[in-house]
Amino acid sequence: MSTYTQSDLVDELVGIFPEFRARWEKDTEDDAFPCSSLHSVYQSLLPFVATQQPTQRQWQRLADHLSAAVDAGGDRDNAADTCMLEHLHQVKLNRVLRPLLSKTARAYVRR
């Protein structure tokens, strides 16, 4: 079984939101001690997505990504849950994303 790395996550999200790479690089450029966690990627992604106007296809792809992360369990599940799904309501994205998520992922989203 291969390990899902921070780089894998960034690449997958850039596949959905090409502009995210520039945001990620800006957010991490001055890190004296770079963090390799999946959590840090989602912490950068949430405010980025909240300021974008994604297409319906991008919303669905993000929902599919988050649902797959929850299904994967472990660190992927924990990072997607604690850094994205639990906070969607704070950036007012819960009504957009919640209906697109799997039943398992929806359970993490506050209304």
Image (cartoon, grey):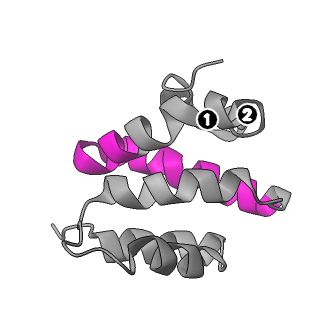
Residue at horizontal 39%, vertical 81%? 29
Decide if residue 79 is on the left or right side of residue 65. left
Magenta-drawn segment? 57-79
In this rendering, the answer to whether 32 lies above or below 45 is below
Decide if residue 66 is on the left or right side of residue 61. left
Q: Quadrant of residue 78?
A: top left
Percent of width and height locating residue 93 = 71, 38
Percent of width and height locating residue 103 = 56, 28
Q: Assign the magenta stretch its main secondary structure.
A: helix
Residue at horizontal 23%, vertical 66%? 35
**How many angstroms separate mark 2 from mark 1 (CA)?**
6 Å
Decide if residue 91 is on the left or right side of residue 27. right
Quadrant of the frame with the N terminus:
bottom left
Considering the numbered disc 2 on the image, is that residue within a helix, a strand or a loop?
A: loop
Viewer-proximal residue among 62 and 79 = 79
Q: Mark 2 — residue?
A: 92
Residue 88: image tag: 1
Q: Quadrant of residue 97?
A: top right
In this rendering, the answer to whether 107 lies above or below 15 is above
Q: Residue 67: within the magenta?
A: yes
In this rendering, the answer to whether 80 lies above or below 52 is above
Percent of width and height locating residue 12 = 49, 72
Quadrant of the frame with the C terminus:
top right
